[in-house]
Image (cartoon, helix red, strand yellow):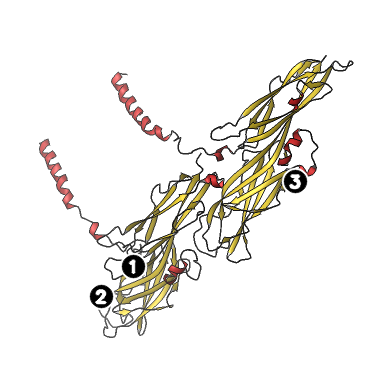
């Protein structure tokens, strides 16, 4: 093929490509990132032992390291968390007794820190002598984190001031149930059911919401004021488990929620919230933000078996 | 030879433009099924916005119907636009209603009809103060206005349609007069049936809402529209008209009710006493009503990262 002929073919193809390609390139300004984009996933703190710390096998009377990597994969900043290490004291000992419980702070995912913060905690320990009759002994090391966390979701809901469709005005929205995916925290709001209830005053309606809540993480929900007790092996009473504090706002009005605080049964439950003040019926149907905040304590443990050889 | 043909063709092309018939002046402005038409101006507001900034909602309003006419014989189309659908504690300072005193309809001097713009300006509050990440605001703009339809149809007035005498008639009464395409208004006369009775001529006038809005009782327009519309004030049309110098006497009494957007009225005029032969004459029907239509736009407002 002659060079002129090649140019004649390539040139139009290039022009067409240049013309049509910009349509395929995504405009980076179309979808700005907000804090809401980081409220995904069902974990708060993710914890894992470092490789060979502790080792799978070691020898008696031998020093070793216990190391854990903590990562805040949720969207809430932990300010005063606890990490504790539990060992079989007959077979191991911590080199520094104060290392048993330590405090930590970890920032959650945000626009400034999209992956969430992480930290490595390493402590030194030493194996003790195993019994004369044994060739080896399997011992378990337990690492636990206890922290206060928050689940937050704001969602635009429909406030229908004409539930029976008596007014013939076009509505901007209709009431519907909203199913949600986890919000970057171990306790999730799974569903919101909306309802407009009649009020004693016939000129008002009361927006009401049934909010379904579930522990979707792999740990336990605890009373947020008892997190230090859990990680310091203080006895925890049954009533201090599965406690979730709830705050629900409709625009700038606080809703009355029952029960408050909520005690999760079988890791899930529901709370009913109502705007007692009501909304005037003569107002047109409108949308409004419903902001739900769940505050709770959370604990999660991880264990690793260490074989102590003679 | 080729250059002669080419020159001839070019000249032919130039002059042929002069032979094209100008159609602009012959446009029938009393055609169509639209009245007041609203639309959001592009990107006013945009689909995505941030908090803590002003928001402008600009609505273009066009009168695509034929009422009112600039002559001043007809009344005024007073248009009020109402804004609703959003949380006014988050978007503050937006006016809830705005009026346009009068917007002329299509006419021979303004074949496109009147045009105006209303602007709603407010401020989005700082979402941090409410701990909100995002909010989907819905803006519903509803117009309420009075309107009129003028339908003109040449009818055949035959005082003796059943006469056995052999006479040459200029016209005969058809089974019905069909009026298609509307009369430059959202409510239209779609059909007229004429019947000659012993002492009067009866016209059954069929009416239909051909627009995309709601017909409102004009007497309740300023009171109930748009927030208190119900079956008591919707679908009411006032019918009147004239033929051969007589005013139509219509039943049921005004206003007549539209059911599923349709209705009819039976109107009569006395049979002309002087004339024994058939003749054609214009029948003019006037419909008066209020009208309401809405447009909606969603805006996602994000907390500034």
Indicate whether A48 appears above or below A289. above
Check disc 2 and report its element: helix, strand or loop: loop
Which quadrant of the structure image shows residue A297? top right
Q: Chain of mark 2?
A: B
* A93 shown above or below B221: above
**In the rendered image, is residue A227 in sight?**
yes
Q: Quadrant of residue B204?
A: bottom left
Q: Is residue A126 left or right of residue B65?
A: right
Horizontally, residue A179 falls left or right of residue A102, namely left
Q: Nearer the viewer, residue B34 or B259?
A: B34
Q: Position of residue A239 (x, y in %)?
A: 78, 44
Question: Which chain is indicated by disc 1?
Answer: B
Q: From the image, state whether disc 2 or disc 3 is nearer to you.
A: 3
Which quarter of the rendering shows the N terminus of chain B?
A: top left
Which residue bears the numbered disc 2?
B170
Residue B34 seen: no
Question: Badges 2 and 1: C-beta atoms under 8 Å apart?
Answer: no
Q: Which residue is mark 3?
A: A265
Instruction: Give residue B105's quadrant in the image.
Output: bottom left
Residue A45, image x, y percentages: 66, 33
Q: Secondary structure at mark 1?
A: loop
Image coordinates for residue B152, horizontal then vertical, percent = 31, 70
Write down the chain letter for disc 3.
Answer: A
Crowding near pointer 1: few (<14 within 10 Å), some, many (20+)?
Answer: many
Nearest to the eye among marks 2 and 1: give it: 1
Which secondary structure, mark 3? loop
Q: CA distance from mark 3 to mark 1?
A: 67 Å
> Badge 1 is on which residue?
B76
Same chain letter for marks 2 and 3: no
């Amino acid at each position: 093929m002659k060079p002129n002929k090649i140019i004649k073919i390539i040139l139009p193809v290039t022009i067409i490509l240049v013309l049509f390609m910009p349509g395929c390139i995504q405009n980076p300004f179309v979808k700005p990132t907000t804090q809401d984009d980081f409220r995904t996933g069902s974990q708060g703190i993710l914890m894992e032992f470092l490789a060979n710390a502790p080792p799978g096998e070691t020898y008696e009377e031998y020093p070793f390291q216990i190391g854990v990597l903590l990562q805040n994969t949720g969207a809430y900043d932990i300010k005063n968390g606890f990490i504790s290490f539990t060992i079989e004291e007959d077979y191991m000992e911590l080199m520094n007794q104060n290392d048993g419980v330590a405090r930590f702070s970890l920032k959650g995912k945000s626009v400034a820190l999209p992956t969430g913060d992480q930290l490595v905690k390493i402590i030194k320990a030493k194996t003790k002598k195993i019994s004369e009759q044994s060739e080896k002994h399997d011992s378990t090391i337990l690492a636990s984190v206890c922290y206060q966390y928050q689940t937050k979701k704001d969602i635009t809901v429909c406030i229908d001031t004409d539930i029976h469709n008596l007014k013939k005005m076009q509505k901007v929205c209709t009431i519907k149930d909203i199913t949600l995916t986890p919000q970057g925290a171990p306790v999730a709001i799974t569903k919101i059911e909306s309802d407009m209830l009649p009020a004693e005053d016939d000129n008002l309606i009361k927006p009401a919401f049934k909010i379904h809540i579930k522990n979707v993480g792999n740990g336990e929900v605890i009373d947020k004021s008892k997190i230090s007790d859990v990680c310091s092996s203080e006895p925890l009473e049954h009533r201090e488990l599965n406690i979730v504090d709830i705050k629900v706002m409709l625009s700038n009005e606080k809703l009355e929620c029952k029960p408050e605080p909520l005690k999760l049964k079988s890791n899930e439950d529901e709370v009913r919230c109502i705007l007692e003040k009501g909304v005037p019926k003569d107002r047109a149907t409108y949308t409004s933000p419903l902001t739900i905040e769940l505050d709770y304590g959370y604990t999660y443990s991880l264990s690793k078996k260490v074989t102590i050889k003679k | 030879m080729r250059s002669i043909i080419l020159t001839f063709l070019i000249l032919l092309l130039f002059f042929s433009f002069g032979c094209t018939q100008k159609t602009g002046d012959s446009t029938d402005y009393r055609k169509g099924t639209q009245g007041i038409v609203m639309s959001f101006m592009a990107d006013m507001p945009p689909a995505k916005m941030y908090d803590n900034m002003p928001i402008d909602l600009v609505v273009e309003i066009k009168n695509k119907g034929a009422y009112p006419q600039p002559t001043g014989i007809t009344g005024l189309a007073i248009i009020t636009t109402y804004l609703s659908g959003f949380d006014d504690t988050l978007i503050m300072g937006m006016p809830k209603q705005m009026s346009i005193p009068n917007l002329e309809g299509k006419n021979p001097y303004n074949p496109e009809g009147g045009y105006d713009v209303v602007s709603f300006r407010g401020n989005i509050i700082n979402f941090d103060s409410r701990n909100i990440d995002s909010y989907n605001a819905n803006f519903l703009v509803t117009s309420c206005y009075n309107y009129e339809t003028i339908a003109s149809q040449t009818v055949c007035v035959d005082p003796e349609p059943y006469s056995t005498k052999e006479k040459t008639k200029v016209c005969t009464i058809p089974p019905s007069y069909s009026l298609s395409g509307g009369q430059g208004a959202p409510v239209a006369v779609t059909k007229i049936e004429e019947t000659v009775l012993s002492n009067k001529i009866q016209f059954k006038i069929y009416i239909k809402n051909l627009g995309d809005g709601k017909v409102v009782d004009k007497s309740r327009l300023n009171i109930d529209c748009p927030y208190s519309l119900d079956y008591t004030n919707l679908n009411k049309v006032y019918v009147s008209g004239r033929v051969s110098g007589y005013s139509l006497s219509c039943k049921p009494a005004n206003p007549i009710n539209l059911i599923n957007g349709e209705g009819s009225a039976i109107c009569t005029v006395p049979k002309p006493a002087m004339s024994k032969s058939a003749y054609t004459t214009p029948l003019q029907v006037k419909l008066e009503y209020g009208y309401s239509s809405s447009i909606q736009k969603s805006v996602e407002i994000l907390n500034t990262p």
